[in-house]
Amino acid sequence: SVTNVNNLSIISGVYPSKHGICSNYKYSKTTNQGTYVEDNKFVISKTIFDICNEKNLTSILATSKNKLKTLLINNNLKNNLSYSTENPDEFLIKRFGEAPSIYTLNANSWTISTASTLIYEKSPDFAYISLTDYPMHKFKPESTESLEHLKLIDNSICELINKNPGYQIFITADHGMSDKTKLINIENELNKYNVHSIAIPIIKDKHEIHHSNLGGSIYIYMNDLTDLNEAKKILKSIDGIEDVLTKSEASQKFNLNSSAIGDLMVLGQKEVVFGNSDISLIPNDLRSHASTYETKIPLIGINTTKNPDYFIENRSIGNYIIDSI
């Protein structure tokens, strides 16, 4: 239940084992360095945008977060218009005025509303709109702020549907969200037994204001692979850890690409998060994701004639669109 991973599955219709994106941040044991996964060069499968390009079809990509704009699409594609609310191009500002900060309640509605107008004016063959989860991280579902955000989203979706009645429209999510109350520091726990490693939260990205880079799963890169079984045994004994998987086990269970993950994958119980070794305190009222408890998502189809039973995962939308074009 991670942003980059699921957005790619939606837009490609395949699992991470095929598209190659298994986290928001990629670490290399060879160089002992990491990089944020924010570039389309990391994607190893075709996306709907690529297929549209091959078939000379037009497309629009509108995102709230700029990292998804740069990840989801190759800048060399023709007949494509792409923009983000976080880092709007000059044409967007001239057309719609200053974009709101993505750390506000109206950022997502602005993204949908601008996309709705551009879809109406340009009639693309395909459009993809991706929003930010900042309000969901910061506010509980029943809070005044959350209800206001949902109202803004609902109104914007109504505008999208009413302006573009001839389109098939799908609404889904890349992950859910849970309250988190317990922090487990993997590196420190293993260090107690003289087992050394590098722990990289799968959720780790530049948007620390969202989740403090604390998420419900984490990759472990062992300094010495001969310690692997010992590390697995130690971690399984810690209260709050739900499962510890080797690279091959994780790849098989979650359809991950083995070249893009750690030596171990650790999953927490619903209230648990993992972070970097320098984080010792969990923020108050933390809401986050990346565990198996945030996989329940909505999947709504409008104007589609496909049997609802076809859509079993969010990536089913990508499969359906690829088959349709």
Image (cartoon, helix red, strand yellow):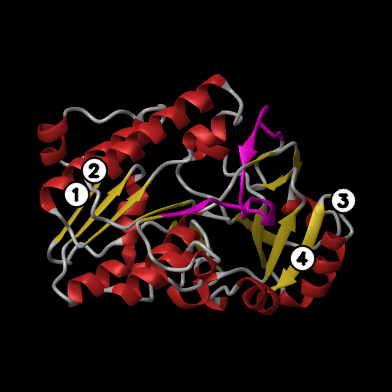
Please, what secondary structure does the residue beneath circle 4 have? strand
Residue stretch in magenta: 281-301
- Gap in Å between the C-alphas at discs 4 and 2? 44 Å
Q: Mark 3 or mark 2, which is nearer to you?
A: 2
Q: Nearer the viewer, residue 26 or 46?
A: 46
Q: Which residue is mark 4?
A: 244
Q: Nearer the viewer, residue 233 or 128?
A: 128
Q: Mark 1 or mark 4: which comes first in sequence?
A: 1
Q: Position of residue 131 (x, y in %)?
A: 39, 44
Please, what secondary structure does the residue beneath circle 3 have? loop
Give the amino acid at mark 2: Ser
Please, what secondary structure does the residue beneath circle 1 have? helix
Question: Does residue 320 lie above or below 289 as drawn?
Answer: below
Q: Mark 3 or mark 1: which comes first in sequence?
A: 1
Give the amino acid at mark 1: Ile
Residue 55 found in image quarter: bottom left
Question: Does residue 59 lie above or below 254 as drawn?
Answer: above
Q: Position of residue 228 (x, y in %)?
A: 77, 73
Q: Which residue is mark 2?
A: 116
Q: Residue at x 16, y 28 (%)?
A: 97
Q: Position of residue 285 (x, y in %)?
A: 66, 28
Give the amino acid at mark 3: Asp
Q: Which residue is mark 3?
A: 239
Q: Mark 4 or mark 2, which is nearer to you?
A: 2
- Gap in Å between the C-alphas at discs 1 and 4? 45 Å
Residue 41 found in image quarter: bottom left
Label ID, residue 318: none
- Gap in Å between the C-alphas at discs 3 and 1? 50 Å
- Gap in Å between the C-alphas at discs 1 and 2? 5 Å
Q: Marks 1 and 2: CB-CB under 8 Å?
A: yes
Q: Report whether residue 204 is seen.
A: yes
Q: Position of residue 192 (x, y in %)?
A: 84, 54
